[in-house]
Amino acid sequence: MDLSPWLILRQASEAVANGRPDDAHRLLAPLVDEGNRKAQRAAREVVKAYCTRAAKQLDQDQPDAAWWDLLAAESLNTGEKCVAELRLTLTRLGLVQARGALEIGDPAAATTVTSRLRERGVRHPDLPRIEEVARDWLAAAGKADRGDFLPAIDDLHRLRAKLPCPPTGLERYRNEIAARHERFLDAVGRAQEATGMRRWRDAVVAADEALSAAPEYHVARSLRTKAWQAAYPDTSEYRSRQPTAPPAASTDVDPFATTQEVADRPAESPASPGPDLTASHPPSGGSKLTVRSPRPEARDEGGGARGSFDTQRSAERRGRSDRAEGGNGAMPGLQATELGSSLGSDRSALPKRFLLWVDGVAGFLVCTGTRVTFGQAVLEGGPVDIPLFADVSRVHAELTRDGEGFLVEAGKAVPVNGKDFTRTVQVNGKEVSRSVLTANDRVTLGATCQFVFHRPVLASSTAKLEITSGHRLMLPVEGVLLMANEVILGPDPQSHIVVRDAPGRILLYRSKDGLSVRFQGGKFLVNDQPFVERALLPLPGSFEAGSLTFTVEAVGPRA
């Protein structure tokens, strides 16, 4: 039954008095549209309540919420002075944030801030200047990644005069580019020299160093591919002669099979076979790949035999020639064919999700599938892999992984009250229906739920999601890992989980029996049982090596 205008005005007045201007706005909107004068006078009180709440949200460091109140107040169009003052305050704050991002050397964050200001109708003379500086900075960074260091340094030098802030971050970044340039020149020179002298393994190492300084330098990629094929000519021939095994033959992943720290594969298409470095020394010309003979059975401290893994690997690798392989580098000691396999096959006994608790660091939700979904956390359970306490739909978006990378896609539109409701997904401030993600991309689900996409280890297809908007998952974890074939823990920044006091690099990887762990730093404990080098890690289970301890446990049905 329709309410009388008098009752609507009274309910709106009570909503304003109780600090609920949005409820009052909803009640008054039809009357304001009809031209009701009393409703128009009441709307002024609603606008003042919006401004008061926005000021409190600013004091609590919630500028996005304050912007929403401002936009709602402006939609009533009452001409209140507090609205103009609030817009000026929020505009100045946004410009300060953008300048601060440039000052610390983060042009991508500055671009995100300026894009939001544009979307919110900000027209300020400083805004185009900040946008231009951030855009030129990112363009110079792209040139450096492609190996064009001198043009990049020159662009950064000219950019200094345009900066609307102190040049601290720009100078630091320019010094980093100059240092990368020196490493790049040295590495390229050594790579060319090694190629001329046919020292192919040295050429692979030097080309990798050049790519670490300029990841998109195509000449180094081509040189590395040539050097790899020349260094291990028999491996490709050996793998091409192997019969294709059925899917059930997927077996144990052994990322530490090679003894060479440079054992990483060249950048190839996912379908092209990669080298299988299972030999202690390069194969001699014209001969097939020589596999190491099995070591004597290792024994733990209790005298029990752990069994020989080498014998198993020799038989198991014959069923892996059909795997898709990717990636263009590996951590020292990792087998390239396995670290590069990015699809994260579901053939192993791993659950789709499990929890990883690292003592003294954080907890992580590890998703092992090639497709994960994001959505609202509900107590009665739901169909999503990553449940969020946020203003998002039940199934808001999905993230898929294949041999080419990661693709985020908004959920399908659903009819609500006769209209299609579209689930919004933004990447770096731009609304998209689908987008390929690259490292450090900022993804926003709905209005405010945001995470940053990280690729901490370039040679690995495992990704890390960092929730930056303050929203929580249903599970008490700090972040999410999208596990391809491995998760690396260690003191090195090139680790998926950085543990400063770790005794060395620890690798969690897929195996035919589920989850396995590898540590080359000596003895370690799994569920209080001693092991050396590698072991199967059951779920639930614990690992301890030196001062590092972590536990794993499976997650039940999807939240």
Image (spheres, rainbow, N blue to C red):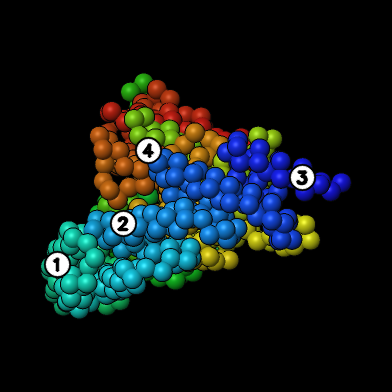
- Residue type at mark 1: give it: Ala
Q: Could you say whether the residue bearing mark 2 is in a helix, strand or loop?
A: helix
Q: Pointer 4 and pointer 1: residues touching (CB < 8 Å)?
A: no
- The span from disc 2 to disc 1 (Cα, nearest Å) is 29 Å
| Residue 197, position as x, y percentages in the image | 14, 75
- Dot label at residue 96: 2
Left or right, residue 22 beside residue 130: right
Q: Earlier in the sequence, mark 2 or mark 4?
A: 2
Q: Residue at x 39, y 35 (%)?
A: 362
- Residue type at mark 3: give it: Trp
Q: Could you say whether the residue bearing mark 3 is in a helix, strand or loop?
A: helix
- Dot label at residue 6: 3
- Residue type at mark 4: give it: Arg
Question: Which residue is the site of mark 4?
Answer: 534
- The span from disc 2 to disc 4 (Cα, nearest Å) is 51 Å
Q: Residue at x 57, y 38 (%)?
A: 19
